[in-house]
Image: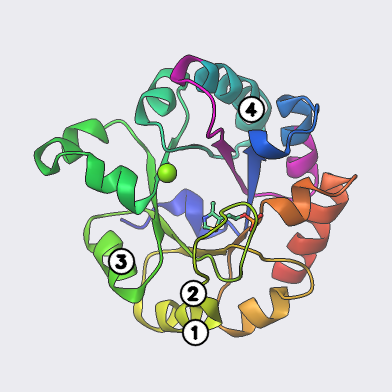
Amino acid sequence: MGNTRLANCRLYGFIDTAYLAGRHPAELARQLIAGGADILQVRAKELSTPQRVELALAVIGVAFPKNLPVIINDDIDAAFESGADGVHLGQEDWAAIPKEQRTDRLANMRIVGRSTHSLEQALQAERDGADYIGVGPVFPTGTKPGVPPVGVELVKEVAARVAVPFFAIGGITLANLDEVRQAGATRVAVVSAILTTPDPAQAAQAFKRKLS
Ligand code: TZP
Ligand code: MG
């Protein structure tokens, strides 16, 4: 699809309710943006759709004036109702939408992302018209426990074979970022390595510097 807003995105930041630790989502969004995040995802596994909409609106209020896209994890209705740019769907989220409804359900999304865990899934997501894909988890991660890591080998394969923009994701830290980049990733999505630090802006900035 070649979504031009994604072309220059390098660092995908998250407002993940599992890591808020009492912080206000809008303030966290501000910090991520200050640190150089290029796109934000609202990830709120335990919230209802109305709660996700409220959270998304708080993030959008900070991100849109800075021209950052905001993506909602899992929840097409929350993305639509909040006016977010789009939605990020896992393999199961995608499979759960009846085939004949996919076009209509996603018609008003400017950006649709998909999680992929194999080359076949990455190629399929590309054929399905995903605007970007996530590739991972590259390394084991507590953010998505119990999911086997795909390793940098898959990053290499996707970099060689897939044209749609991809974000390497899962267990990415400043210590392994070079390995991920050397495998061919120019974009990364980082949750815990930024959100568990006392200064998310500084952490994001450290990632961004290495990515630019
Ligand atoms: N999808 C694949 S791995 C992952 C998601 C949402 C978790 C990424 O979080 P972290 O903390 O950066 O490993
Ligand atoms: Mg999902």
Q: CA distance from mark 2 to mark 4?
A: 31 Å
Point out which mark residue 153 bears.
1
Comes first in the chain, label 3 or label 1 = 3
The x and y percentages for residue 97 are: 21, 39
The disc, 2 or 4, on the residue closer to the chain's N-terminal end is 4
Residue 66: image location, x then y, percent: 67, 35
Q: Quarter of the image containing the C terminus? A: bottom right
Residue drawn at x 56%, y 37% as measured from the top left:
43
Q: Quadrant of the N terminus?
A: bottom left
In the rendered image, which residue does mark 2 sit on? 150
Depth check, mark 3 against mark 4: the one in front is 3
Query: Disc 3 marks which residue?
Result: 121
State yes or no: residue 33 in magenta.
Answer: yes
Secondary element under disc 2, as helix, strand or loop, is loop
The reply to whether residue 170 is visible in this rendering is: yes
Magenta-colored span = 30-50
Q: What is the C-alpha distance between the residues marked 2 and 3?
A: 12 Å
Q: CA distance from mark 1 to mark 4?
A: 34 Å
The amino acid type, in three-letter code, at marker 2 is Val
| Residue type, label 1 | Glu
Residue type marked 4: Val
Labels 1 and 2 touching (C-beta < 8 A)? yes
Q: Position of residue 29 (x, y in %)?
A: 72, 34
